[in-house]
Structures are given as C-alpha cells and as structure tokens.
Image: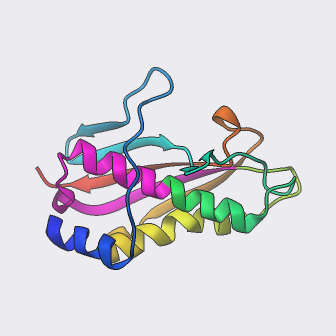
Amino acid sequence: MTTASFDDRLKDLAIELPPAGAPVANYVPVVLHDGLATVSGQLPRDAGGLVTGKVGEGLTPEAAQAAARLCGLAVIAQLRGALGGRLDRVVRCVQLTGFVNAGPAFTDHPQVVNGASDLMVEVFGEAGRHARAAVGAGSLPLGAAVEVAAVFAIRP
C-alpha cells in the first residue's frame, strides 16, 4: 500500500490524525531499529484535553473504548512522524499493548482495547491485524483512562 492509499483511507474514514505529541518524561516517542518501529505508550487526548478516569468507577467501558481509539490515533500520528510522513513503509502492525485504568471489579479490558485494535484494522487493513495484550492497571500516567503502545514492521 502506498502513502497516498493510506492517506486516502484515512480521508475516506474521515479520520484526522492529531499532531504527534512531545514526550512527557525521559523517553523518545518512536524507536526505529532493525525493521521495527516501536511506538511508546500514547495517552488519549481530544479537543477537551487528556481523557482521564477509571473504568468501573465513573468512566463507562464505552468511553474508555473511545479513549483507546484516541490512543490509536496518537500511535499512528507518532509513527507517521517517525517515518517522515511515509506510512507506505508500514508492513504490519505486529504488537499492540493496551493498559486500562480500571477498578478492581472491572474485567472487560479486551473490549476497551478494541478501540485501538479496530482502528489499526480500519486504517491498515489486513496489515493492521496484530498480536495484543490488554492489561488492567490501578493507575496510569496523569490519570489517563487508557494508554496504548505498538510495534510495527517497516520497510527501509
């Protein structure tokens, strides 16, 4: 798939990527190494700012799933930036890891992280299908509702 076709797909889906955010601590947003692009954990931000809260304690699973999608958008934005705007270098989304800020009684983490997983398939098609971990966390940085990290196979 070429950059134009990924861009066309984003446009067809009415998806606008956010600006790639700066790190909030001592790390880099993306590491490119040996045919892989490892994207650091991304937090959910919308027009109102950071989406915060704990699923099962005031935040609905649906709102958390929407937050996971926002994380996925941030992952793609970071990836695009690291690849010089050339998403045509993406071969496959290899691994997606989602952390869900959840109360102890909440157990449906996979459905929350589907917000990001579904986005990868929407944007990258079959190349967006990936291995995954969906993990519950007692808290996340800055009180974020969800955090998503990813690994992509890329062409030189």
- Return the residue nearer the eye: 3 or 15: 15
Residue closer to the observer: 123 or 113: 123
Does the segment drawn in magenta span residue 93?
yes
Q: Quadrant of residue 126?
A: bottom left
Position of 133 relative to 118 (above/below): above
Residue that sits furthest to the left in the current view: 156
In the image, what residue occupies the spot 29% across and 63% down? 92
Left of 91 or right of it: where is 40? right
Instruction: Name the residue rendered at 19%, 51% in the picture.
Output: 85
Is 123 contained in the magenta span? no
Give the answer, above or below, for where 85 lies relative to 143.
Answer: below
Judged left or right of residue 79, residue 75 is: right
Q: Can residue 129 be seen from the camera position used here?
A: no
The location of residue 12, given as percent across then percent down, is 32, 79
| Magenta-colored span | 72-100
54 to the left or right of 131: right
> Residue pushed farthest front?
47
Count of marks placed on residues: 0
Against 125, residue 88 (above or below) is above
Residue drawn at (37%, 29%), measured in percent from left and top? 28
The residue shown at (46%, 69%) is 119
Image quarter of residue 110: bottom right
Image position, residue 33 (x, y; %):
23, 38
Q: From where the camera sits, is residue 25 visible?
A: yes
The image shows residue 154 at horizontal and vertical percentages of 21, 54
Residues 27 and 47: in front is 47
